[in-house]
Amino acid sequence: MTLSHRDILDKVLFVGPDTRSGGGISYVLNVYREMFGGITYAPTTHHRGKVLGAIRFALTMALLPVYRLRGFRIVHAHGSVRGSWRRKCLLLRWAGLLGMRTIHHIHNGALRKHFTAMGLEKVTRQMAKSDCVVALTDSWKSYLHDELGVPAVEVIENPVRPARVVRKPSPGPLRLLFISAIDHTKGLFELLEALYDHRDELSGRVRLDIGGSGIDDKRMHDFLASHPMPGMVTLHGWVSGHAKETLLESNDVFVLPSYAEGMPISLLEAMSAGLAAIVTPVGGIPEAVADGYGAIYVKVRDKESIYRAIRSFLDRPDAVETMGARNRDTVCRYYPDRVSRRLLGLYTKILHS
């Protein structure tokens, strides 16, 4: 008997963080809702804090037998590392004991670092208990399957909504855009130092918009207070919806010189809007955008490398147009219609195995 897409989805329980909390996993799950016309979702955290999050997690654990009795056959758990890892492992073990099939979908760009710290044998044993582990990129699949020996690993890329806006060319300074968590591991401070060190040359020729919030908010504000760059840097705080679209439409080059990444949603959004990029070749980034084709690669923790990339776009303004157009073409494989087909194929395989 062939199941319809709706019949398949009615057997899948999606689990992960409160989707009101923002961030990459929340974005992915909200796109799932849109592309499938609704999903059954059980959060394991709460956007208002850890105490309510613990209660929410306990409630989801308690309700798993009810979901099983209602006919849910697959638990698709989305998580990261640290506390998220512990919660998902506990929940997936419980789901397995209840006779449910399990998918452990890992969203993190620093798997080697965290898994080594946690103990590779322990991590591998845990992942092997799931019917499938989902990686964001081919390189992470190779690490999990070939190096760690996890038996069943599939690649499901992060979906990105097609942009509703497209970059508008404008005369004047080169417009740089940073949208991500305000966290030193995103390379933000190397970017700011590159602008400050060369401010006499770049003032009036380059401007930077920063959208985001995070653990290094104070450090960022302190840096800008002690390293003034009048007219060069604008802070927007956390951005979403129309505010994010406005930034995508009014900038030229997306900059994300991260130390580590999975598959950054913000990069895919910028590509869809037709921006060129300055990025580090970490995690899944090289699988999304190629050096010299849609982006200029820079070295991790290297402010002079970032400066040289900015200078390259200043010296070759036509590259902004060319690379942006290429990015709009290549990002199509991350659009929801393609990702949904891969997900439904995975669910069908698990249900029939």
Image: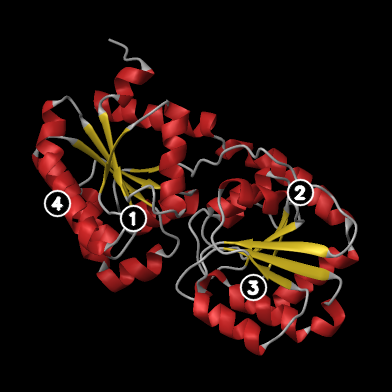
Cα separation, mark 1 vs mark 4, equals: 15 Å
Kindly report which numbered mark, 1 or 2, lies closer to the viewer in this rendering.
1
Quadrant into which the C terminus falls: top left
Taking the image as shown, residue 22 lies to the left or right of residue 82, namely right
- Labels 4 & 2 near each other (Cβ < 8 A): no
Residue type at mark 4 is: Ala
| Residue in the foreground of this view, choosing between 243 and 333 | 243
Mark 3 or mark 4, earlier in chain: 4
Cα separation, mark 1 vs mark 2, equals: 35 Å
Give the answer, above or below, for where 82 lies relative to 345: below
Return the residue at label 1.
47
Using the image, tell me which numbered label, if any, was put on residue 58. 4
Q: Indicate how the structure is coloured in the image.
A: secondary structure
Residue type at mark 3 is: Lys
Instruction: Identify the residue shown where x is 25% and y is 26%.
Output: 11
Q: Tag 2's secondary structure?
A: helix
